[in-house]
Amino acid sequence: MSAAAGRLPARGAALVAPIAALALWALLAAVWSSPRLPGPLAVAIALAEAALNGPLWADLGASLSRVGRGWALAAAVGLPLGAAAALGGPLFGGLRLVAGALRPVPPIAWVPLAILWLGLGDHGATFIVAIGASAPIFAQASWGLARCPPQLLEMAHAVGAGRRQVLLGLRLPAALPALSAGLRTGLGVAWTSVIAAELLGAQSGLGYRIGALRLGLDVPGVIAHMLVIGAVGALMDRAVAVAEARLLRWPAGAA
């Protein structure tokens, strides 16, 4: 049996759980027979209507734009601060204490301040995204850059390597998995943060649309947009995972 043929049963088995969940959903909707739990067909119709005649694509574009800007801002702030916390000595060691105190505060708790400081719309939502995404990026950067194997550092110092050579030749390659994990986790947090921010403090986006549909008691529309959020989040995570695999393959190939 070829490898391709062997993969077919595995792919078919992977579909069992989604099909079973869909069937259970349809059964519960039929038994309960309530507008509060529409069946898969009603949700599919709502999704098609939103995609063909509604503002789905505009809302998706608005949410993705905020995520992109907020994630980039979080990386621009979190990576250097994480590096400073790991390599800056006692002067910057307190950054971990500050980050540790702020990390338990959920991004949605910043929404009132974001509205007061930046108003409704893009700026406030982007701020919330950056706040949420910066925590894992900072944590992984500070952890990864501080964990270079001591034996390698001793060898580098023994041959007279300078700080710049140690950073670029040893610490950075050793920290790449942690840095990549922080950016990937930060993107996931950014996506959930933007939905929360749009629910409370925006005039566009998927989160805003869910809130508007809820007020209109459009339950199929709410569930349809929730499915879009889940699908887009999974696609983004998959794209980052592929990029991560290629990035982490590069140092080994270069060696």
Image: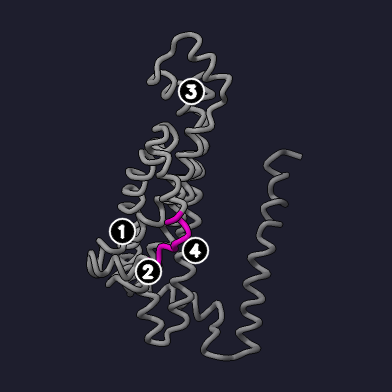
- The answer to whether marks 4 and 3 mark residues whose Cβ atoms lie closer than 8 Å is no
Q: Which residue is mark 3?
A: 170
Instruction: Tell me which numbered mark, 2 or 4, is placed earlier along the sequence.
Output: 2
Labels 2, 1: front one: 1
Residue under the point 44% across and 9% down: 160
Disc 1 marks a residue whose amino acid type is Phe
- The circle on residue 187 is none
In the image, residue 70 above or below residue 203:
above
What's the CA distance linking mark 1 and mark 3? 34 Å
Callout 1: 10 Å neighbours few (<14), some, many (20+)? Answer: many
Callout 3: 10 Å neighbours few (<14), some, many (20+)? Answer: some
Residue under the point 37% across and 41% down: 81
Answer left or right for 171 relative to 81: right
Regarding residue 182, the answer to whether it shows in the image is: yes
Instruction: Tell me which numbered mark, 4 or 3, is placed earlier along the sequence.
Output: 3
Across and down, in percent, residue 218 comes to 42, 84
Q: Which residue is mark 4?
A: 230
Residue occupying the far front of the picture: 90
Residue under the point 36% across and 38% down: 80
In the image, residue 201 above or below residue 30:
above
Front-lying residue, 156 or 21: 156
- The answer to whether marks 3 and 2 mark residues whose Cβ atoms lie closer than 8 Å is no
Disc 4 marks a residue whose amino acid type is Gly
Quadrant housing the N terminus? top right
- The circle on residue 206 is 2
In the image, residue 152 above or below residue 198:
above
What's the CA distance linking mark 2 and mark 1? 17 Å
Magenta segment boundaries in residue numbering: 101-109
- The circle on residue 127 is 1
Q: Secondary structure at mark 2?
A: helix
Residue under the point 64% across and 83% down: 28
Where residue 119 sits, quadrant-wise, is: bottom left
